[in-house]
């Protein structure tokens, strides 16, 4: 189980690095989606779902950075 949780943390770090380097949003989000689908496909343990939140948080950061004007419009 620790291997899966470690994988989530490592992928989240990679996604954050790609976001800060200005990588295209489609590439970055593609990594997140594929990682979540692969890592969660065979598990039935709620600990994995808790661990996936770090990766989902990285996904939200990518979305908000690249669409900040859109999100600001929603909040007003």
Image: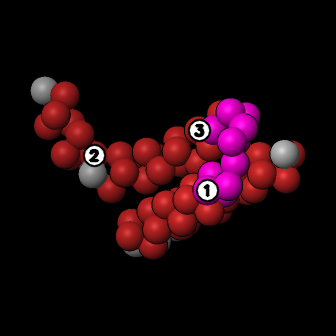
For the residues labelled 1 and 3, say whether their Cβ atoms are less than 8 Å apart.
Answer: no
Q: Image point 75% across, 56% down: which residue? A: 7
Label 2 crowd bin: few (<14), some (14–19), many (20+), radius 10 Å: few
Q: Is residue 20 left or right of residue 9?
A: left
Tell me, yes or no, whether the two marked residues, 1 and 2, touch with CB atoms within 8 Å: no
37 versus 56 height, above or below: below
What residue does disc 1 label? 41
Q: Distance of mark 1 from mark 3, alpha carbons?
A: 15 Å
In what quadrant of the picture does the N terminus appear? top right
Towards the viewer: 41 or 20 = 41
Helix, strand or loop status at disc 2: helix
Q: Element at badge 3?
A: helix
Which residue corresponds to the image point at 16% horizontal and 34% vertical from the top-left?
74
Label 1 SS: loop
* Circle on res. 68: 2
* Residues at circles 2 and 3 in contact by the CB criterion of under 8 Å: no
Read off the residue under disc 3: 53
Label 1 – label 2 distance at C-alpha: 31 Å
- Numbered disc total: 3
* Quadrant placement of the C terminus: top left
> What crowding class fits label 1: few (fewer than 14 Cα within 10 Å), some (14-19), or many (20 or more)?
few
User: Which residue is at 43% across, 53% downward?
Assistant: 62
Q: Which residues lie in the magenta part?
A: 39-49
Of label 1 and label 2, which has the lower sequence position?
Answer: 1
Instruction: Give residue 3's position: percent from left, percent from top.
Output: 85, 53
Q: Is residue 60 left or right of residue 15?
A: left
Image coords of residue 18 (percent x, y): 55, 66
The residue closer to the viewer here, 30 or 41, is: 41
Q: Position of residue 60 (x, y in %)?
A: 43, 45
């Amino acid at each position: 189980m620790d291997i899966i949780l470690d994988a989530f943390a490592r992928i989240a770090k990679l996604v954050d690095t790609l976001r800060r380097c200005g990588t295209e949003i489609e590439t970055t989000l593609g990594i997140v989606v594929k990682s979540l689908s692969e890592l969660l496909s065979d598990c039935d343990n709620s600990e994995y779902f808790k661990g996936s939140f770090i990766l989902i948080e990285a996904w939200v950061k990518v979305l908000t950075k690249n669409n900040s004007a859109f999100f600001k419009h929603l909040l007003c």
